[in-house]
Image (spheres, rainbow, N blue to C red):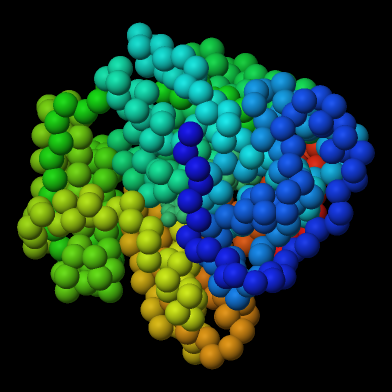
């Protein structure tokens, strides 16, 4: 079984806790032990489960500040354990933080309200592969490599390859509404999922979807839980679409004078109906950093049936006819480094404040949003770098993925908050979406009422109906508790 990897270790010596959380009612632990559910109140285990990959918490840990301490760590072995935990937590009014790989970068798996850290990584079985229909049923705690190994052995792939592929679980992909790097071809997780099994706050086990490619029987309940970040229930199983392993792939690299020109080429390619698996455009700073190209690099890769790939790459070449053709070796460079996550921890340890902000918007807004966000970040005196790439494209818009680096003299947290405030305001004012695939977690919760507008009221009513005692990950998504 995969063990979650964390970006930095806590220093030796006494640690303080940023969100200490209230003490856990011992009667709850007794209840769970009575049911035979594996529960631990060991200090080291609670400390280990008190964090995720939220970059701000890397800074805290480096300073000897643990993000949070749950009252207990519970590791369910099967779905009925999850049901027992949720029912007991509701009876005792104790919050539950579902945890997969804890690779989330917005603090959603940090048990900042104490209570139970529900580690789902023991629920990791690949249950059933239907080769004729092209689906797999898998438990939520299964990590990416374990799922792919099982599928590859039968000639299939799920096609969902986030940069955190080795760090994240199926449940986390779904809970955060994630996107893989090849998603233009395979779809985002909401396109890949066909059905779910979810345990609700009261312990009831519900199934959604699972009856083929779609149904017109009321609203899609599966999608209610996709992106809910553990605030509406715990995902325990999923049915996902799988595809035959690709027989063929082609690569190309181009470069443009400006982000605007590159974005326009991406738009034309996609709007002609060509969806190369990878179509990533980098600004000059990121092109220099990643490929030593002093212009805006466009990395293209497609895979699948040779006839489809040839047509797709032909459309790409036609729409990039005015661009500079660069060496296709740059795609190999990208492939070799795309899952390298080693830089983040050391940068924070050296006193830099670093994070990424992925947003989405319609094509007509992307250049203004790009300009507004980079200007807002650069207006902060501590900012050293504000750069961007386009990572996922659609017929009507795309994801812009910003990176900022700052070096505050003191108080990294104030600068961090100011950077997120400035960038998020610029995105929302520009007509963009707050998050494209990392989700909201705790870090972005304060922006949710603005980001959802009148829809926020609908979401809070759904929350009250499904989780009246607010035990499901309170505070995340600005639901059931105060945002950070
Ligand atoms: C270096 C790096 C690169 C990344 N690249 C990408 C990327 O390319 N694409 C992308 O989409 N994301 C990316 N991420 C973000 C992160 O990996 C994803 O959000 C991932 O889907 C989280 O999965 P996890 O299992 O680690 O979830 P966790 O971090 O454990 O949890 C995330 C949230 O989901 C909830 N949750 C987890 N499991 C369940 C469950 N079974 N039921 C209900 N709620 C649950 C948690 O409570 C929390 O709110 C990246 C992260 C890192 C550190």
Q: Nearer the viewer, residue 465 or 438?
A: 438
- Which residue of the protein is positioned furthest toward the top in this rendering? 132
Q: Quadrant of residue 97?
A: top right
Left or right: 82 in relation to 327: right
Q: Nearer the viewer, residue 355 or 19?
A: 19
Q: Which percent across, then down, holds residue 139?
A: 54, 26
Residue at (58% x, 88% y) in the render: 410
Quadrant of the image containing the C terminus:
bottom right
Q: Nearer the viewer, residue 33 or 290?
A: 33
Residue at (34% x, 28% y) in the render: 149
Q: Which percent across, then down, holds residue 245?
A: 25, 25
Left or right: 83 in relation to 277: right
- Which residue of the protein is positioned furthest toward the front in this rendering? 13
- Seen in the picture, residue 28 relative to 457 is either above or below; the reply is above
Left or right: 231 in relation to 129: right
**Is there any visible trace of residue 258 in the rendered image?**
no
Q: Quadrant of residue 421?
A: bottom right
Residue at (50% x, 17% y) in the render: 127
Q: Which percent across, then down, holds residue 54?
A: 56, 60
Left or right: 62 in relation to 335: right
């Amino acid at each position: 079984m995969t063990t979650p990897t964390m970006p930095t270790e806590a220093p030796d010596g006494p640690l303080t806790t940023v969100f200490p959380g209230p003490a856990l009612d011992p009667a709850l632990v007794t209840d769970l032990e009575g049911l035979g559910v594996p529960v631990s109140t060991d200090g080291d285990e609670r400390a280990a489960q008190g964090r995720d990959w939220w970059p701000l918490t890397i800074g805290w840990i480096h300073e000897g500040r643990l993000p949070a301490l749950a009252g207990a760590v519970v590791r369910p072995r099967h779905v009925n354990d999850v049901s027992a935990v949720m029912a007991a937590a509701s009876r005792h009014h104790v919050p539950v933080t579902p945890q997969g790989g804890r690779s989330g970068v917005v603090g959603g798996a940090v048990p900042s309200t104490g209570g139970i850290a529900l580690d789902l990584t023991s629920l990791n079985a690949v249950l059933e592969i239907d080769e004729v229909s092209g689906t797999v049923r898998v438990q939520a705690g299964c990590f990416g490599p374990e799922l792919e190994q099982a599928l590859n052995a039968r000639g299939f792939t799920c096609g969902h390859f986030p940069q955190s592929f080795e760090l994240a679980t199926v449940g986390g992909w779904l809970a955060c509404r994630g996107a893989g790097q090849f998603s233009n071809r395979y779809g985002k997780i909401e396109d890949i999922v066909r059905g779910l099994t979810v345990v609700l706050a009261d312990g009831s086990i519900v199934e959604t979807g699972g009856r083929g490619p779609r149904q017109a029987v009321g609203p899609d309940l599966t999608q209610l839980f996709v992106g809910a970040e553990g605030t509406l229930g715990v995902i325990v199983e999923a049915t996902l679409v799988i595809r035959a392993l690709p027989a063929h792939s082609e690569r190309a690299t181009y470069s443009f004078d400006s982000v605007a020109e590159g974005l326009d080429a991406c738009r034309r390619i996609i709007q002609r109906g060509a969806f190369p698996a990878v179509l990533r455009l980098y600004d000059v700073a990121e092109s220099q950093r990643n490929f030593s190209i002093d212009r805006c690099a466009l990395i293209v890769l497609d895979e699948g049936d040779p006839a489809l790939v040839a047509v797709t790459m032909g459309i790409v070449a036609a729409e990039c006819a005015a661009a500079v053709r660069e060496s296709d070796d740059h795609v190999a460079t990208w492939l070799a480094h795309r899952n390298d996550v080693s830089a983040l921890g050391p940068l924070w340890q050296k006193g830099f404040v670093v994070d990424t902000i992925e947003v989405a918007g319609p094509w007509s807004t992307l250049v203004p949003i790009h300009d507004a966000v980079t200007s807002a970040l650069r207006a902060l005196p501590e900012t050293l770098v504000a750069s961007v790439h386009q990572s996922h494209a659609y017929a009507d818009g795309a994801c812009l993925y910003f990176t900022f680096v700052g070096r505050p003299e003191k108080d990294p947290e104030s600068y961090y908050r100011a950077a997120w405030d400035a960038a998020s305001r610029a995105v929302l004012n520009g007509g963009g979406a707050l998050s494209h695939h990392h989700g909201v977690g705790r870090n972005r919760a304060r922006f949710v009422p603005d980001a959802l507008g009148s829809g926020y009221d609908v979401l809070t009513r759904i929350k009250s109906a499904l989780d009246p005692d607010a035990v499901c990950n309170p505070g995340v998504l600005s639901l059931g508790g105060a945002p950070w």
